[in-house]
Amino acid sequence: MSVFTPVPESVLAEWLKGYAVGRLTELKGISAGVQNSNFFVTTTLGRYVLTLFEDLSRAELPYYLHLMAHLARHGLPVPGPIANRDNEYLGTLEDRPAALVVRLSGRSEMAPGIAHCEKIGAMLAGLHLAGQSYGRHQDNPRGTAWRSASAAIVRPYLPADEQALLDDELAFQSTLDVSALPAGAIHADLFRDNVLWDDDDGQLRVGGVIDFYFAGDDVFLFDVAVTVNDWCTLADGELDPARTQALLEAYHAERPFTAAERTAWPAMLRAAALRFWLSRADDFHLPRAGEMVLVKDPNEYRDILRLRVRGAPPLPL
Amino acid sequence: MSVFTPVPESVLAEWLKGYAVGRLTELKGISAGVQNSNFFVTTTLGRYVLTLFEDLSRAELPYYLHLMAHLARHGLPVPGPIANRDNEYLGTLEDRPAALVVRLSGRSEMAPGIAHCEKIGAMLAGLHLAGQSYGRHQDNPRGTAWRSASAAIVRPYLPADEQALLDDELAFQSTLDVSALPAGAIHADLFRDNVLWDDDDGQLRVGGVIDFYFAGDDVFLFDVAVTVNDWCTLADGELDPARTQALLEAYHAERPFTAAERTAWPAMLRAAALRFWLSRADDFHLPRAGEMVLVKDPNEYRDILRLRVRGAPPLPL
């Protein structure tokens, strides 16, 4: 999340009259993330996060907002979007589609231990299970088709050895048959900075899973692989066996892995690494203007992909 | 809230399989309140409150549960009911209607200061405004008709001077015309123990408004009077002018009082006092069996009523 579009306080104060959240007392831009403009909004009645959508169109947004609402009302710590007085989640602010969501409490943990990974594994399975009764559908916007298209755009900017890595991986991925893998709504971006930890009573707990704006329908195992690649990777890019085991075991306890998923696991770790290498390479080589923009290092995921290709570990269960 | 119906862990663990909230890790009865059986439920994915309804029927409950869902999705700190895998809020447990709601964080403040009263005034107005787009309707279950019926039941148990107080007050209340007062969904029981305060970041904030099971449609001013009688009353039963002023001003800033409300205010403080005197006298003189039941002192509200009759202050705005 970042700020591309500034919002004057007076404009927001007026806009909030369409909601039942009280009167504006504080507005603060959030300097994290890569896709939307985000703000902390405090009113006389509560604390909220305001998002102005820079890339996503008005037609795409209901899938995300209603998914968040669905998961929240099924008891998961997901920021529910807030309905305005017309009972709509989606509004317009500074000519952008805009939504207000509940601000959940807690802070990200960028150096997670085994206990964090265990809780994240359980939570990811919970999200997958709760999403099964969600009625809307949208293909994973960073799925197979996007990866091929994105590779074509990024390829010319890469040195020869990276082009070879990319070509080989796309060829390998195209041989995979994922049709037997359990699928449904996935978060698809459950990185450490998209989880808020809350320990107000001394118990470690996921207080919030945020930023669902890459969600879509895809195989659950892809989501597990995205999550493991971020939460369980050591500084050198290899997987930490203890954290990996903890995350996968906790996931398995909520939603047991199938035999087909065991087989597909090493390839899925590669697909997940490829997806983030590509999007980061795109952001890096084809940057866009913005007020406060965070560009992440594409080489991190290039290296993770190389390591997973060299030898990805089997599903340790 | 109290516990009248015990729930074995094994029964709850099985019941929770109908939800997407993970697996049961802890179950604890809550020993507060007077009407339902309540439990803290902790699972692998979150913290919830389970309520078994002892008095309310299955037909009455949708009004309350959907009101809570409506207020939560409009951004207010109200515990949203949790939908099960069939997308229903209302289930059955131990032969009782039962619902699981989000457990909000924070603690009650039984000795509120001016700052608390200010925030409660704003929050109450916010609840009234947000409730205006709620589609379901139900008369206040402790409204005028209930007060007359309840008085007839309780009267024989009272000493002569209290019977006289009751008769005079019912006669006075029957002369009031409330048709010009703004009305809508009201909480009707916004006592100090039904508000959770959260100050995790050093800012005093209402983290939760709970126990909507006396809610109904009635004039907003009745709700304000119930709230003021509890939050702003000194040990001797008189109103604390500073806290009263703070609560009413903050309410007024969100939803300005009308001229008709100014006129009706002293009488409404009496109606609100009468309502709690009656229900407590009923609980006291006609007690019911229960595992952990809290009976509140009826004399507190008899005395408050006497004081408000002797001279209730005008709306100080």
Image (cartoon, coloured by chain):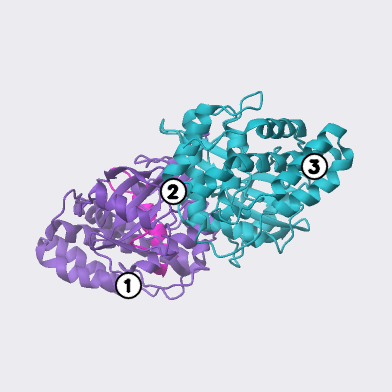
Chain colours: A purple, B cyan
Residue drawn at x 41%, y 33% as measured from the top left = B203
A104 horizontally vs B36: left or right: left
User: Which one is nearer the viewer's eye here, B244 or A205?
Assistant: B244
| Chain of the residue on which disc 3 is drawn | B
- The mark lying in front, picked from 2 and 3, is 3
Q: Provide the residue designation for mark 1.
A: A59
User: Which one is nearer the viewer's eye here, B172 or A85?
Assistant: B172
- The mark lying in front, picked from 1 and 3, is 3
Q: CA distance from mark 2 to mark 3?
A: 54 Å
Residue A162 appears in which quarter of the rendering? bottom left
* Mark 1 and mark 2 on one chain: yes
Q: CA distance from mark 1 to mark 2?
A: 26 Å
Residue A194 at what x, y percent from top left?
A: 36, 50
Magenta residue span: A212-238
Amino acid bearing label 2: Gly
- The mark lying in front, picked from 1 and 2, is 1
Residue drawn at x 63%, y 55% as measured from the top left = B216
| Chain of the residue on which disc 2 is drawn | A
B244 horizontally vs A25: left or right: right
Local secondary structure at mark 2: strand
A234 falls in the magenta region: yes
N-terminal of the pair, mark 1 or mark 2, is 1
Q: CA distance from mark 1 to mark 3?
A: 62 Å
Marks 1/3 in contact by CB < 8 Å: the verdict is: no
User: Which one is nearer the viewer's eye here, A102 or A237?
Assistant: A102
Q: Provide the residue designation for mark 2.
A: A208
Local secondary structure at mark 3: helix
Residue drawn at x 54%, y 29% as measured from the top left = B112
Q: Provide the residue designation for mark 3.
A: B167
Amino acid bearing label 3: Asp
A142 falls in the magenta region: no
